[in-house]
Image (spheres, grey):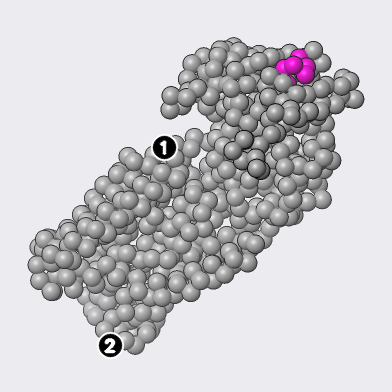
Amino acid sequence: MVRLPQAPLPLMLALLLAAAGASLVIGKVWLPPVVLFDGLAAPKPNLAWLIVTELRIPRTVLALMVGATLGLGGAVLQGLLRNPLAEPGLLGVSGGAALGAVVAIYFGLATRFALATPLLGIAGALAAGALTFLFGRSGTLTLILAGSAVSGLAAAGLALALNFAPSPYAAYEITTWLLGSVAEREWSQIALCTPFILAGWLCLAATPRGLDALTLGEAQAESLGVNLNMLRALALAGVALSVGAATAMAGAIGFVGLVAPHLVRPFVGYRPSRILLPSAVFGALLLLVTDIAIRVIPTSSELKLGVLTSLIGTPFFFWLVLRLRRLSP
Amino acid sequence: MTVLHAENVSYDIAGRSLVSNIDLACESGQFVALLGANGAGKSTLIRMLSGLQRPSRGEVRLDVRPIRAIDRRELARRRAYIPQNARVEWPVAVERLVALGLMPQIPVFGDLDKAAWRKVEAALALCGLSHKTGQPATTLSGGELARAMLARALVGEPEIVIADEPLSGLDPKHAMDGVARLAALARSGRLIIASIHDLTLAARYATHVAIMRSGRLLAYGPTASTLTSSRICAAFDVDACVQGSGAQAIVDFIARPDTSALHPGLAPA
């Protein structure tokens, strides 16, 4: 039997470690390893130690968690829907999370209570996921349609919030938040969203068998003993929990969930079950490297993470179109 | 001995009746060809017989147990189902596609062991696809893909194989190959149920035919005595003649002069 090349998972993990190390070093204040270790050894608190533990590590951890979530969510949804354009935002949960977070900013809750933004974001994601499930649980196509309806509803809510923003400053704050960032997040916020992200990952980790069976289409997957309703519910719950919590923390970050599964797919022989882990690792790597890049790229005001992922992602989208055009007559 | 029994099953959707009161019992060793015009309800009946569709009324039983009450994975081990125009969604290697048929056999976590790969190789060889190992399944021709789907269905050694138009879109050689393969499986003691449009192939290879019209079962029985020109006429609205029997049987259609005539309004003046 011919075995297709295995995913270069060890290589990606090594790169991920290297990127995580670089992420601690690189920033407005460069902390070369020597300074870093001196800071860790010196009596605390000192500047290097504060920068690393209060800024760099939370930022790195968040980039890794959000990137992995987007990569995993994209891989599961592309497998479930058997559509290369599926991405984690498709089911409306990103929109719901964004709307929840924006409501927190709009009513000024965010300034009074730091956990208001992620809390309302997660609530928004769960509400959006429940709404999608309520209308779309009967089939895959209805699930996509219900997801776009919920996304539309959330977009309308966001537009409404911008329209009636109490002050130009609030409108500015809302737009900047929507651009997406993992900077300046507190440990308490990360601690709040972590259980939701982990619970989402658990749901998504239960899907690979069903996704493999779907290689043969829904009818044959069902005949092989796959409970399609259960599979759809698991995927939706997993995406709502993990992507919802990630969006509530970091704002709308596009394209990572779309790109990551595509790039790892050829290395695993296109088997949907084998894409999940490499896609998550690659998503984490991609987002972390992008986040390091925005710290290095000299711009007058800070370049937002979501902006750069979209800028990098769009050419990829064109490449995808070209490739599909070549493959189909 | 496996008995698959549809007890007076009906299926209604949106006030329309697709299948009404069909009673059909099949057992191991039979190759049942399901015949009928487009829209006669063959696919619906096949989905109910496979346990994928709950009948609106009536019950399908597999060895007296209601088929919908059997554990999904146990049922998946015992019967294989091949839908009409089965497609493959990702360019997985052919042997991986076939190996998906072993999913009900292998534990939830874990990959295929040596014994499982031997089964895959045997199924590929049985369907004449050994040379396609390693090739992406999306690049197979129509005939090869149909054979790969059959190999996928057979790899788990099910007692029952149910296929919805397994010969559609195949050229004469591949269609004959396919139907002969199904007949050989029936001879080896499996129950084969397949909807077939090529009546000559059905007459030659099927042990039994079930003829449907508008959701009802017109006739069911051994091929030689059941597949008659009057029944074909009733099921398909064409005149037909059945010549010979067994391996020499030929079913041919004769156009009716009045049906081919143009509507008076469309006739040239």
Residue A238, percent from left and from top: 39, 48
Q: Which residues are magenta?
A: B226-232
Residue A290 lies in the magenta-colored region: no
Classify residue A243 by image quadrant. Answer: bottom left
Which residue lies under the disc numbered 2?
A300
Q: Nearer the viewer, mark 1 or mark 2?
A: 1
- Quadrant of the image containing the C terminus of chain A: bottom right
- Evaluate whether label 1 is on the same chain as label 2: yes
- Residue at image point 31% right, 79% down: A303
Q: Position of residue A189 (x, y in %)?
A: 24, 60
Q: Could you say which quadrant of the image residue B106 lies in?
A: top right
Picture coordinates of residue B187 (x, y %)?
Answer: 82, 22
The location of residue A151, given as percent across then percent down, is 32, 55
Query: Does residue A165 show up?
Result: yes
Element type where label 1 sits in the image? loop
Residue B205 in view (yes/no): no
Residue at which label 1 appears: A138
Query: What amino acid is found at the position of numbered circle 2 in the picture?
Result: Ser
- Residue located 70% across and 28% down the image: B258
Task: Please tell me which residue is depicted at 74% across the width and 54% down the height of the picture.
Answer: B134
Name the subunit of mark 1: A
Instruction: Judge left or right: residue A255 versus residue A183.
Output: right
Question: Is B122 drawn above or below residue A28 in the view shown?
Answer: above
